[in-house]
């Protein structure tokens, strides 16, 4: 797996998107104690994306914790002309995702959690399908995993030690 981790995100303007909020209950002798977990995706809509999970007693605290966690998990994704370089599959737990490049004008054809991740990274034209679990947490993680495994022609050429033109000749 190729790691495209971004080291410093302090000077980058990242927009955050709330994907899901869950109310969780801890049952004790004195009754139920409620808290909240939030999953957030951040991105600059130009090839950077990250996700984070925050848990707290209040919704706003959970969201702010999730945003801070997401800023620590930012990765670089190759995006060309608003789409991805090639098709990619990925699986995380019970969620399986398939993303495929699309021609200009198609739009983001994806559901809920996948749409938030793909729009945050800056993809404007893509076909996506999720199979298996529709759990937002697992879908976000599977989509990030698929985006992490994308490679552009320059990366392939560098890994093989050849020119970019030779990559396309075969």
Image (spheres, helix red, strand yellow):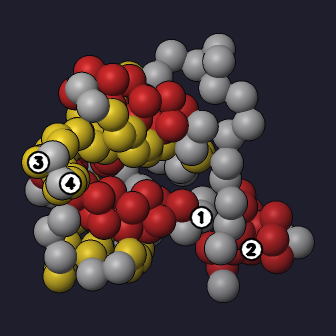
Q: Which mark is residue 31?
A: 3
In front: mark 4 or mark 1? Answer: 4
The tag earlier along the polypeptide, 3 or 1, is: 3
Could you tell me if residue 85 is visible in this image?
no
Label 3 neighbour load within 10 Å: few <14, some 14-19, many 20+: few
In front: mark 3 or mark 2? Answer: 3
The tag earlier along the polypeptide, 4 or 1, is: 4
Horizontal arrangement in the rendering, residue 74 relative to residue 18 (left or right): right
**Depth order, front residue of 114/81:** 114
- Residue labelled with disc 2: 166
Q: Which mark is residue 10?
A: none
Image location (x, y in percent) of residue 158: 82, 64
Tell me how far mark 4 sits from mark 1, CA to CA.
49 Å
- Residue labelled with disc 4: 28
Tell me how far mark 4 sits from mark 3, CA to CA.
5 Å
Tell me how far mark 4 sits from mark 2, CA to CA.
65 Å
């Amino acid at each position: 797996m190729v790691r495209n981790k971004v080291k410093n995100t302090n000077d980058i303007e990242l927009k955050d998107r709330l994907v899901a909020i869950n109310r969780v209950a801890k049952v004790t002798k004195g009754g139920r104690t409620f808290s909240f977990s939030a999953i957030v995706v951040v991105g600059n809509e130009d090839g950077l994306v990250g996700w984070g999970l925050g848990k707290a007693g209040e919704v706003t605290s959970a969201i702010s914790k999730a945003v801070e966690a997401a800023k620590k998990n930012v990765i670089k994704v190759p995006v060309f002309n608003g789409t991805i370089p090639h098709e990619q599959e990925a699986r995380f737990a019970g969620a399986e995702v398939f993303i495929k490049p699309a021609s200009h004008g198609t739009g983001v054809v994806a559901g809920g959690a996948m749409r938030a991740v793909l729009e945050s990274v800056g993809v404007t034209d893509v076909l996506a399908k999720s199979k298996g679990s529709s759990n937002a947490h697992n879908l976000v993680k599977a989509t990030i995993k698929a985006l992490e495994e994308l490679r552009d022609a320059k990366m392939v050429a560098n890994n093989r030690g050849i020119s970019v033109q030779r990559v396309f000749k075969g």
